[in-house]
Amino acid sequence: MIKLVLSDMDNTLIPLGQRVSPRTVEAIHAVLDAGVRFGPATGRDYVELSRLFRMHEECFMTGIFSNGKRVRLDGRYVSTTLIPHDQLVRIDQAIRGEKGMFLVCFPEETNLMNPAYGVGVSSAELAVFEARTVFNGGVVDEVPDIPFVAATIACTGGPERMARCQRIVAEAVPELRIVSPIPDWFDVMPKGMSKAASLPILLDELDITPDEVLVFGDAANDLELFGAVPNSVAVANAIPEVAEAARWHVGASAEEGVADALFEIAVAAVTGGTPDFMKE
């Protein structure tokens, strides 16, 4: 029986740049009302999730945030990992001279007005990614000396520039790794940190097993989590590697494929049956 549903956000639960639809919120409530916990497993953090869920906090009371750097259960954080300031400074120094590359840092404590800092970049350059990935940012010359729970790297110019960025960061800051959830964009993570690495924290807190968890995803940063649970689900727009790794498949994010599946999960939880998408 499924007791916990985790879903990636961008291009899984919602198309990139959009907010959660009323129908998807309804589907999440159906799951919660059926006694199944729901939460995001995402690179996004609390403030961004507040915006994407249109302030429906009940939809993300539990989940894996910031690619595993924060774990939330029933409205409280049970685990938080910060990115050391000196490591972010070294990233900035390493990519500062590279055209089209810049660092964006997300503070541990923030608000809806200014949840991110674009480092060494113009307001116009930052605005492109603000609009594309749905965040509000401010421009700074240096990495502020405050606690940061997440960071990303914007990298325009195609696959060759992306590969160069990975090489630069690996050499300058070997303690970190960067993973691309969408084109031209990297998530920055401590080595060993991932959505999958933080899943056992939730399992222990809830006293459940991996076979009682179902996960939706679409991108490379979902692959490790897919390998950690038997019930992995790819949306129709998932990259080929994720589609191949998934046990089950649902409709595309633009067609609210996850919402359709959530309604089926809710019915199955009440009746003791099996969701239709798991009968493939």
Image: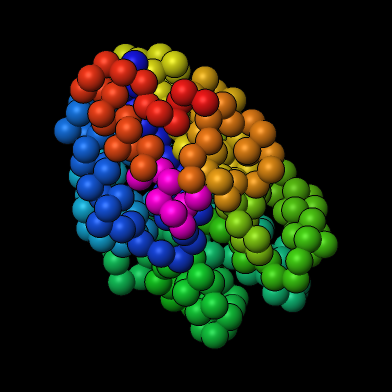
Give the residue at x 48% y 45%. Answer: 251
Magenta span: predominant SS is helix
Q: How is the image coloured?
A: rainbow
Q: Which residue is pictured at 32% across the width and 30% down the height?
A: 265
Residue 258 lies in magenta, yes or no?
yes
Q: Give x and y (percent) for residue 199.
A: 45, 27
Count of numbered circles on the image: 0
Q: Is residue 8 above or below residue 203?
A: below
Q: Quadrant of the N terminus?
A: top left
Is 92 on the left or on the right of 273, as rendered?
A: right
Q: Which stretch appears magenta? A: 252-259
Query: Is residue 276 at all visible to an observer of this figure?
Result: yes
Residue 234 picture location, percent across and down: 54, 38
Quarter where residue 225 is shown = top right
Instruction: Tell whether position 70 is magenta.
Output: no
**Residue displayed at 69% across by 43% down:** 240
In the rendered image, residue 212, in percent from the top left (x then y), is placed at 38, 18
- Does the image show residue 192? no
Decide which of 151, 260 is in the foreground and name it: 260
- Residue in the foreground of this view, choosing between 197 and 211: 211
- Residue 257 vertical placement versus 30 (above, below): below
Q: Is residue 245 left or right of residue 211?
A: right
Residue at 31% in and 58% down: 21
The extreme left residue here reads: 33
